[in-house]
Image: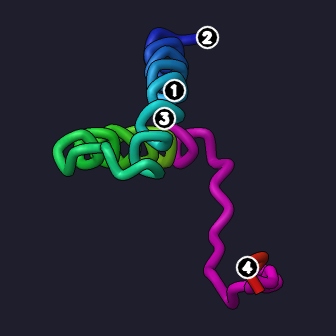
């Protein structure tokens, strides 16, 4: 494994450990805009790094979104 891959995996691990606490704060509306932007920036950077790595290895699959499957609605429990 080359150094860049080790660094990428280490950053994946760091971001992975930070996602759940921020997601919990987003759900309870206590995450600050700055905190959300910082995580978003890290996720975007990491995604771009993963994409570049995939380009180098030649294992990129081109795709496009063709539709969205809506989740079934859940009846309101208060009714």
- Check the image and name the residue furthest to the left: 34
In this figure, which residue is indicated by the disc labeled 4?
Answer: 78
Mark 1 surroundings: few (<14), some (14-19) or many (≥20) residues within 10 A: some
* Nearer-N-terminus badge (4/1): 1
| Residue 29 located within the stretch drawn in magenta | no
* Nearer-N-terminus badge (2/3): 2
Q: Position of residue 44 (x, y in %)?
A: 36, 49
The residue sitting at 73% across, 79% down in the picture is: 78
Which secondary structure, mark 4? loop
Quadrant that contains the C terminus = bottom right
Quadrant that contains the N terminus = top right
The residue sitting at 54% across, 28% down in the picture is: 16
- The CA distance from mark 2 to mark 4 is 55 Å
* In front of the other: 55 or 75: 75
- The CA distance from mark 4 to mark 1 is 41 Å
Q: Which residues are magenta?
A: 53-76
The circle on residue 12 is 1
Q: Single out the mark in the foreground, 2 or 4.
A: 4
Mark 4 surroundings: few (<14), some (14-19) or many (≥20) residues within 10 A: few
Q: On screen, 13 above or below 63?
A: above
- The CA distance from mark 4 to mark 3 is 32 Å
> Is 67 on the left-hand or right-hand side of 24?
right
* Nearer-N-terminus badge (2/4): 2
In this figure, which residue is indicated by the disc labeled 2?
Answer: 1
The circle on residue 19 is 3
């Amino acid at each position: 494994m080359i150094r860049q891959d080790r660094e990428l995996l280490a950053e994946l691990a760091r971001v992975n450990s930070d996602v759940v606490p921020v997601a919990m704060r987003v759900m309870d509306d206590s995450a600050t805009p700055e905190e959300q932007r910082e995580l978003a920036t890290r996720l975007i950077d990491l995604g771009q790094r993963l994409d570049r790595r995939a380009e180098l290895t030649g294992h990129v699959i081109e795709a496009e979104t063709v539709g969205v499957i809506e989740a079934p609605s859940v009846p309101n429990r208060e009714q």
